[in-house]
Structure formats: structure tokens, C-alpha cells
Image (tube, coloured by chain):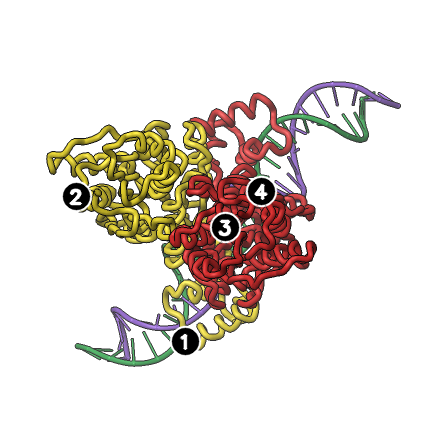
Chain colours: A yellow, B red, C purple, D green
DNA sequence: GCGCCATGTGTCAACGTCAACATATGCGAC
DNA sequence: GTCGCATATGTTGACGTTGACACATGGCGC
């Protein structure tokens, strides 16, 4: 900076003013300074800036390693939006949901230079770990309901699950079986609740849900059980991967999908459209969720203002895996 | 820090020594200082540290938005390993491979506080954009061959493709058809080359490869063409997603897999095991690639030493989608 | 003609840390 | 006894930036 100042024949402060477009700078001076910066390849030193201002222009993201496709896409969207707003992103991975590793992540976070934090971890898992959220730093939750204390951004799980269930019922199925996500997952629970309420609202029998863990393998295992039950004609899996597993179980046994059994997933994995049969699913928009999370956080950081956070809607995408019952 | 020093009745420098475990500190003093740090909740200020030391203990990762599953897993592994070594991770997303956005990413990078950079972008796309890599900062490439200038870490694409092709040939197929990745992809090219060389080595006919773009949809489209050709009995798709599409095309036409046609993918997507039929594939280890990339970079950062970077091997996972020809 | 204000620029200090240097004590070797 | 060295601690200044303040100049209103 000093070199630039000398080169342009001004003081360091004026260079600072040009860089930050703050305060009065004469047009000719600005030009001289800009030219000097160009010539010398000057880049402001972010460490010094941060030291001086106490702000890092960096957002920390805490996220499980081995995260779901949806969360990966959310992260992606967070990165893009943050970059667009001039924020860098610092990723703090959490290797497992063991209490100490989550706590460790937060401890690491405190040493890191972040102005705000986006937490992309399902809240139930957090509760269990009973981790204390860092104080004094704005926090936004994604995919959870830590709600009261901090803003949270999420997909409208209930609406999506309702769409899926109603689609099957509207096709004429007498009831809908459900493969859930893991017990400790907030979104899994919301989907299960909405499925159940939809059935109850129509006065229909609510079959015992089968527990999965998001993985295609767990969907397959649920499918093995479902295919033994003759009365099963419609299955709503809480995500696309488990739907893939359910699909396998039925087809492996020579049962036709959608002829004998209809299957709906949840997520909108791009590949789900290329399964055979193509999977009917609930399309989520993790990219909107991620962008919204950044907007909410940055609004709080820059303007100190707390934005409204509507749930992000989903749409049903009807493909070949669903049909009226025989 | 000053508060801690006062609390412990020592100078700031001694606190610094305790924190960094450098220089001589009396045992009793150390204990007093540590207790004071604990009591006051002291965290070293990373900005000041960075300003002082010129090192940020941060690694920048440049990566395409909408990246493949493998790259996501690589990122994940990078994050975990970096955290383990006490490095923070800054993510710089590149939204598209348009020349200006890639260039923009590097420009942003120069302003960011990173000690080293890991670039997870296929080199061919980089070449095209003709982007200048930042000078004076150690760079490691993943998934590409920018090689000569900078270290690079990658999966042994050729070995994997050879495994896949030989598996099909060993089953007795007369030749193997190939669905490639995008033309500009380095790994796609390596897989195609190895497939071709394997066939040539056995003096077999090399069918015209079909071009895909990694997506399941493109695999489906390739499959539509392949299923018109009666002589096709074995297909090697350059990734699992395209294999899913190929699979769909055949099954949709009532063609049996693996009865009439065998299909092999590449990647080792966890869900590929739950397809019907379960997909034979080449298992990659992106987590090893990511960890290795960090190790190489950190070796250069901390020890100034350039590590050997062996290619990361793959294994063939034989499942239900391959069988001897009828 | 005087004061006021908008404009343009410079000086200084401080952000929190740590390397370099200075200082102090005690112990063993000659 | 005194010199040298290992050990233990304190003082100072600098890293690069920017906020606060000071100081100019010139135009406008009265």
C-alpha cells in the first residue's frame, strides 16, 4: 500500500479511500491511484483489514461429512451466493455426529475468522450432542428447527410429503406405506408426520412406517419387507435413494412397478429420472435454500436486520413409477 | 491476550509462548497462564496472527459448482484432512467454465487469505479458459494433468478403465462398446484411451465410442442408440450415472441385463449397488485423492518439500449387471 | 468581506500477535 | 570466583489497514 501511495504521490489513506470507495477523492487522484495499483499489482491484505475492522468477510459453514446430495447442493448454492456478495466461505466439516466431534467443530470455528455461521446439520442430531452454539456470532440453521433462538431456512418438508401422499391417494390407492429417514432427523420426522396427517385427514388407515436411514440399502431392506405384504400397492419413500432400494426389492422379485406397486421418492435427484421406471418424486430446491440462508445471514451481518424466512416450496414430478392400482 | 497476561501476572509474550509452545516457559507459569486463558475464554485472534506471520493456515479450494459426486467426496475428504492438520478451508466456487468466471475465481482467490490452493477442475476445461494460475502460491491439481508445473493428484483412470474392459472381455464378450464422458474432460479421455488400448492389445475391433456428458440422461441417449445395434453385448460407461441411463434404455425396450447385454460403470456410487440389476462398476476412492492432495500441499507449505504423488488405484466391483454373453 | 460548508488530502494511532532483542537467575566447569 | 550457558521472562516494534482528526482550498450566502 505504501508503494502504491508513493507511486501515485499520495498518502496511504488516500489509497485506502480509493480501494474502499469511501470519503472524498478527486477524480484525477483516483485515476492515478488506480493506475498505480494496477501497475504494482496491489491487493489489499485481508489479514490487516480483518485485524483493523474486526470483520473478516467470511462465512463459516458447518456441515456433516458424507452429507446427502441435497446438502451438497445447498453447500454449493451457499458458496455461489456468498461469493456473489463478496464473502469467502470457510468449511468446517464434522466427521460424525459423535458429541465430541461436533463440539470440536464449534471449538475450531471459534478460532476461525468468521463473521457468521451457517449450520447445515439436522437439528435432532445437534440436540443430542447438546452442543453449545457459539455466542456473539450470528448463526443461521439450515435443515433444522433450532428455530426460536436463531433464524432457520428449510424446505417445506410437510408440503412435499403431502404432495407425494396425495398423489398416490388421488390415483386411487387405498393407503400409502412409508419408508422413513433416520429417527434422529428433523426432516425425516416432518415428512413422516405430514404423510400420517394426510392419511388421517382422509380417514384412512395409517400403516406402520418402515424405518430407513436415507441410504439406498436401507430402502432395499424396507422393500424386502414390503414386498412380502400383498396389500401394499403404494409406497412413499422419504428420499429418492431409499426409493431406488425399494424399487430394486420389488423388481428383483418380479413385481411390476408401477403395475403392481407405485413408488414415490423425495428430493429430485437428477438421476432418478433415468431409472427404469423413471421415479416419481418431490422436487426440492436446495439451491434456493442455500442462497436464502446466505441472504438471511448477510442481512444480519451487514444491516443487522433479521429477515423473514419462508419455507422453500417443492413440486411433485410425476414420472413412470406411479400409476393407479390394478 | 493482554487480559490473560494481567490475570496470570505475566507479559503478553509469555502468553504467546504458552499458546504456541515455543521457547522456555516455567511449568508453574505455564499452568497459571493456561488457567487464565481458560477462565477468560481466550482465543488467539487469527487475523492478527496472519498479519504478523504472513501465513493464514488456510487452504483455498477452487471447484466447479454442480460438481460430480466424486468431486464432492473429494472436497469432503479435503475438508476433513485439512481440519485434521489445523488448516481452514476456503471454498471458491466456479459457476461455469466460461473463461471469465474461471478467471474471476482466481482473481477472488488472490484477495483471499490462502496459503495454498487445491484446484479440482478438469484440466482440459482449464486449458481452454487459458486462465493464469496465481503465482507465488503453491498449487495442487486434482483430477487433471496440469502436471509439469504443479503437482497433481488423481485416480488411476487408465487402470480402472482397463479393469472394466478386461472384465467384460474375460466374460467372453467379443468386444466392448464405450460411452465416454465429455470431450473436454481429462479423466474421460484417459478412460477412453485405456478402453481402446485394452481392445487393441487383444487385437479386437474397436467400436465407435458414443459421446456422453457424465449425466444419466446422456447415458440414456447413448443407450437408445446402442439398443438399436444387435451386435452390442457389452457396454462400458465412463461413469455410473451414464451406466444408469444405458441400463434404462435397454430395460425399457425389454432387453435383459445382464442376459442380453452386460453393463459396467465407473465411480462406485453407493446407490449403484441398489439398482436392479446391481451395477458392476469400478470403485474409485475420492476420499484418498482428497486427503492426498492436502498432504501434498501441506508438505509444500510446511516443509517446502515436494511429495511424490502416486495415482490412486481402483478396484472392480462385480455385481449383477455383467454376465457371459448368451 | 466574513463565516460556513462541501470537498479533498494528510497524519497518527491502534487493531492483536510475535520475532528479535534485552534482561535476569542459577548452575556447573575451569 | 568468574565465565559461559541454559533457562525463564519482559520490552519493543512492526506486520497493513483504516477510523478519527486535522488541515487545506474554494464557492456560496449574507
Badge 4: how crowded within 10 Å, few (<14), some, or many (20+)? Answer: many
At mark 1, the secondary structure is helix
Per the image, the residue denoted by label 1 is A27
Compared to A84, does A63 lie above or below?
above
Badge 3: how crowded within 10 Å, few (<14), some, or many (20+)? Answer: many
Badge 2: how crowded within 10 Å, few (<14), some, or many (20+)? Answer: some
Disc 2: which chain? A
At mark 2, the secondary structure is loop
Q: Residue at x 53, y 70 (%)?
A: A38
Disc 4: which chain? B
Q: Is residue B32 visible?
A: yes
Labels 1 and 2 share a subunit: yes
Q: Mark 4 and mark 3: span between their CA atoms?
A: 18 Å
Disc 1: which chain? A
Per the image, the residue denoted by label 2 is A172
Q: Residue at x 51, y 62 (%)?
A: B211
Are the residues flagged by discs 4 and 2 in contact, CB closer than 8 Å? no
Whether residue A315 sits left or right of residue B166 in the image: it is: left
At mark 4, the secondary structure is strand
Q: Which mark is residue B261?
A: 3
Per the image, the residue denoted by label 4 is B316
Disc 3: which chain? B
Amino acid at each position: 500500500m505504501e508503494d502504491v501511495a508513493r507511486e501515485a504521490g499520495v498518502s496511504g489513506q488516500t489509497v485506502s479511500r480509493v480501494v474502499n470507495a469511501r470519503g472524498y477523492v478527486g477524480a484525477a487522484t483516483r485515476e492515478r491511484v488506480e493506475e498505480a495499483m494496477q501497475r504494482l499489482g496491489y491487493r489489499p491484505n485481508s489479514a490487516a483489514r480483518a485485524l483493523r475492522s474486526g470483520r473478516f468477510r467470511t462465512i463459516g459453514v458447518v456441515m456433516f461429512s458424507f452429507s446427502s446430495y441435497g446438502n451438497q447442493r445447498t453447500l454449493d448454492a451457499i458458496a455461489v451466493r456468498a461469493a456473489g456478495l463478496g464473502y469467502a466461505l470457510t468449511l468446517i466439516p464434522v466427521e460424525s455426529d459423535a458429541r465430541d466431534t461436533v463440539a470440536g467443530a464449534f471449538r475450531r470455528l471459534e478460532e476461525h475468522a468468521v463473521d457468521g455461521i451457517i449450520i447445515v446439520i439436522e437439528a435432532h442430531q445437534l440436540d443430542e450432542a447438546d452442543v453449545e452454539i457459539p455466542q456473539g456470532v450470528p448463526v443461521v440453521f439450515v435443515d433444522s428447527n433450532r428455530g426460536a433462538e436463531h433464524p432457520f431456512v428449510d424446505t417445506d418438508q410437510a408440503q412435499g410429503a403431502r404432495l407425494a401422499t396425495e398423489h398416490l391417494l388421488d390415483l386411487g390407492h387405498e393407503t400409502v406405506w412409508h419408508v422413513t429417514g433416520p429417527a434422529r432427523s428433523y426432516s425425516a420426522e416432518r415428512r413422516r408426520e405430514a404423510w400420517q396427517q394426510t392419511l388421517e385427514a382422509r380417514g384412512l388407515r395409517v400403516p406402520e412406517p418402515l424405518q430407513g436411514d436415507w441410504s439406498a440399502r436401507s430402502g432395499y431392506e424396507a422393500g424386502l419387507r414390503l414386498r412380502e405384504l400383498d396389500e401394499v400397492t403404494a409406497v412413499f419413500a422419504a428420499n429418492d435413494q431409499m426409493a431406488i432400494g425399494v424399487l430394486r426389492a420389488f423388481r428383483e422379485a418380479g413385481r411390476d412397478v408401477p403395475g403392481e406397486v407405485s413408488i414415490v421418492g423425495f428430493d429430485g435427484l437428477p438421476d432418478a429420472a433415468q431409472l427404469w421406471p423413471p421415479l416419481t418424486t418431490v422436487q426440492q430446491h436446495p439451491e434456493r435454500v442455500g442462497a436464502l440462508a446466505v441472504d438471511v445471514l448477510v442481512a444480519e451481518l451487514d444491516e443487522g436486520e433479521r429477515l423473514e424466512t419462508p419455507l422453500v416450496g417443492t413440486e411433485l414430478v410425476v414420472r413412470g413409477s406411479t400409476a393407479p392400482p390394478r
